[in-house]
Image (cartoon, rainbow, N blue to C red):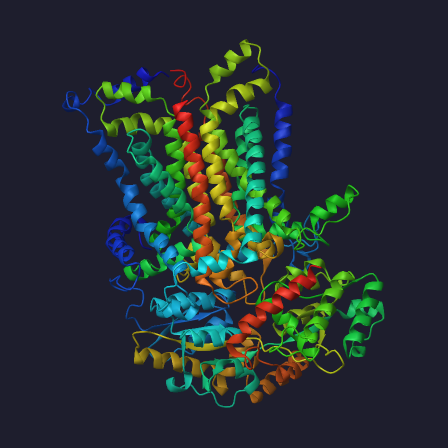
Amino acid sequence: MHASSVSASARRAHGSPARRRLHRLTPTRWAAIGFAAPLILYMLIFYVVPLVQNVSMSLHRYSRRTFVTGEAPFVGLDIYKEVLSTNEFWTTLGQTLIFVVVSIVFQYSIGLALAVFFNQNFKLSATLRGIFLVPWLLPPMISGTIWQWMMDADNGIINKFLGMLGIAPVWWLQAGHSLWAVIIANIWLGIPFNLVILYSGLQNISKDLYEAASLDGCNGWQKFWKITFPLLRPVTMITLLLGFVYTLKTVDIIWLMTQGSGTSQTLATWSYAMAFGKGYSSTIRYSEASVVGTLLILIALIFAFIYIGVQRREEKA
Amino acid sequence: MRHRPTWWKTLIGIILTLIMLFPVYWMINISFTQRSAIRSGDLYPKAFTTENFQRVFADQMPYLGTSLLIALACVVLTLAIALPAAYSIAILHLGGKKTMDFLLVAAQMVPAVVMALAFYQIFNQIGLLDTIAGLILADSTVAVPFAVMLLTSFMGSMPVSLVEAARIDGASDWRIFTQIVIPLSRNYIVTTALFSFLWAWSDFMFASTLDAGGGKLRPITMGLYDFIGAQNQEWGPLMATAVVASVPTALMLIVAQKYVAAGVTAGAVKD
Amino acid sequence: MRSSHISVIPTAQKALSCGVAVALVATLAGCGGSSSSAAGSKTLTFWDPYPQYTTGSVWDKQVKSCAPKGWKVKRQGMPQNDVLNNLTTAVKSDNAPDVAVIDNPFMPTAVDSGLVTDLASAGVSTKGFDKNIEGPGIVDGKQYGLAFGTNALGLYYNPAVLQKAGVDPSSIKDWQSLNAAIKKVVDSGAKGITFAGITGEEGVFQFLPWFWGAKGNLAHPDSQAAKEAENLVSGWVRNGWAPKSVATDNQSASWDLMLTGDYGFAENGSWQAAAAKKKGFKSIPIPAKDGGVAPVPTGGEFATLPFHKKADKDRQAAAAQLISCLTSDSELGKTNEAIGYLAAKKSVRDQQVKNDELWAPWVESVENARGRTTDIGMKYESVSAQLSKSLQAALNS
């Protein structure tokens, strides 16, 4: 379908073009604001309060009592200094980065490989692709528990499979390396997300390009690197950005498998534990939780900054 | 190329799907297992029982309906806000795109805990606590920023020529939006709808904070509470609930995926 | 059912004016509006940590049957860990329930944060209840919560497994004989012992009998006693007597392992007594290091009257009446049977034991049980965190 034919059919469907507008300069700007108005209102209502509250809590020293009475003293950046001066913060930051980077690298590359594979329109491909999303339907409470059981050191099915291959059982959830266990589960959880977005991206690449490339004698591998990958770049970038954001704030699956104990503690689970008085200590530490939460937002913004920078360069190119 | 046999691709596809679905199989396996054997790690339900399902069908069905309603309403709300916004940012060049991107990323990073606490206080004031409407609004906050970003990114890569041609033809912004941009965005709309459906479907944090007193008008993630005691959780019925809840939605997913069709913009990209 | 579509738009407008104002002053105090959720109907809201007892269950009926004349009760069950946090949020927004049932180690915190009010001034009688069980609810001489019953930890065993291994459970008097018995069980080809070592309060709850059994004192959580108790339980894991999953198992998960029938022993609570009887499991009190019965922490919850900024005398009196009814001599037995607890009053407890011999092995543990927060109050939060950390380190080594 060509551009002209699209608008032509649009015209046909709705009778003659709107005469009123023919000679008037469309005030696009007003239209732009009008179309964006619902979102702007929505953001103001739903995000400004929580965002402000999050920052405000990180600047006041809250306990459970002062949370109720609202009498928490303002302490400026003191709590930031305290949190940043602990070893726990830096260890947890390192673990978080490993968790995020390793998860994303595997989620994305497996998701892309699967998207390309399912893009070949073989028998059952659409059905199988749909079924691939089923893991996402499971409430996190269920998938987390299932992974914990499958990774059970003594009785877990994964160790039983390994045993069949003659590999010694692994104590997956041992505190010293539980980070890797939760990464594996998280990769599994993230594959459908990457698959779906990348697949819809592939759908928008013209089949003609591939045919032309075939005529030029390109093989499948070359076609992937010369056509698919470059044309998928905008989709890749948004997938990576969103994947980064979601992985950074992952709590559920880690919590259900290990309660964020040992090396599997990330900034997000740490913040969650402090905000709810879960994990080791039942003492609520709203302020520290908000500090970590605010730092998480900053980390995500750094990544967004990179994203926008890359996008700009592409637009110029 | 089309005539080459593809059965082996189907076979690989099935094998990959089976690996991916193994944890789901495990859930089904446990849902048919008696409590005494759920931690035995048997590959199939050796200690077979259907009792878990009987309990689910007796207690959990109202929650399922509520979940469905919430998730579908959340999809509608998300698209109603995100589609025009993405159109405005990407095609009408609203301006401040960088600021918008920052805001959207920041919005997604606000910890769910903080969001839930803030909503609790607001909802308590305006009487939305323990209502389905309140939960739909809260659940949509997970999906809206995502939807705006994804749709903006896609519409940004849509060929400008289409829109310009239509504008020269005198089409109004509204008509360009509904007649050209929305049909061309079909794949992404389906994708966005899927995600917002799934997030609303599996939400637990908002439900437990904002709709804990909703009685039978609570989503299925809260219905699971019925099997969680102070020191005693019954994983058999929990897993059975998850299985029952997955069936209708899995069918929907599969159908929806068929709508992510090839060739929507074929030809357009060449322009 | 309220229609989502109709209410979305007006709500958004209301929320907007409200939300923006709030953002400007960065506080929620100025946010006006009608609070409709606590509307004037004569309904008492009742929160408890027993979501598994759904509408129509024995517990549900027991609570509702105690509603004072002219009042209805709306019960809301939620997981144990959520009650305190939800109550905190609700009290802050002046939307608290009329009665909340809170886990006992959280009582000092709830009192300190002003979440709950003094029972005596509301007219609830607390006479005749056991001191050791009520301890956590008493802060600075005032009683803020009433424990209607309690549970305790014990050592369950599987007689079939023990018999096959040639172990006589009555030979278990101290840690040494316990270890010998576990070893014999493992040598016979069965599995040894399960317990819950999960991070947080639940793991510490199960650890305390060993800690106190080695003469530990909560005022000194890093003492020799703590080391000895940690060595005992982590030694089981190192020897392969206990599963590695104890570090992440909660009490329910560890019970699931016991139910497989493969294990000789399980440390678990009296709430499993009925299930254990069905499987033919029996129990003994947990032994102290050098013999005798180790003190166990009191388990169970306190009925409390949450704080309301806008006090409603009638409502509070009705709530107090509800608690009084549940804990009255004539109802206390039924209240406890409904949730599988032993009553916190000796006369009622004796009656329970008389009616069902299931409870007999637990009486001694219950009467010797110690409140976790009775001696050190609020400090218990940090002590528990410290114990949890070192226990986790030991179990993962």
In the drawing, does residue B126 fall left or right of residue A86?
Answer: left
Seen from the viewer's position, the closer of residues C123 and B244 is C123
Q: Position of residue A90 (x, y in %)?
A: 55, 52
Quarter location, residue A55: bottom left
Q: Position of residue C9 (x, y in %)?
A: 26, 48
User: In the rendered view, would you say C337 is above or below B39?
Assistant: below
Q: Quadrant of the N terminus of chain C?
A: bottom left
Residue at x 57%, y 89% (from the top left corner): C347
Instruction: Inspect this view and state whether residue B218 appears.
Output: no
User: In the rendered view, would you say C37 is above or below A304?
Assistant: below
In the drawing, does residue C58 fall left or right of residue B21?
Answer: left
Q: Position of residue C366 (x, y in %)?
A: 62, 81
Instruction: Inspect this view and state whether residue B55 appears.
Output: yes
Seen from the viewer's position, the closer of residues B134 and A70 is A70
User: In the rendered view, would you say B68 is above or below A80?
Assistant: above
Residue at x 66%, y 84% (from the top left corner): C364
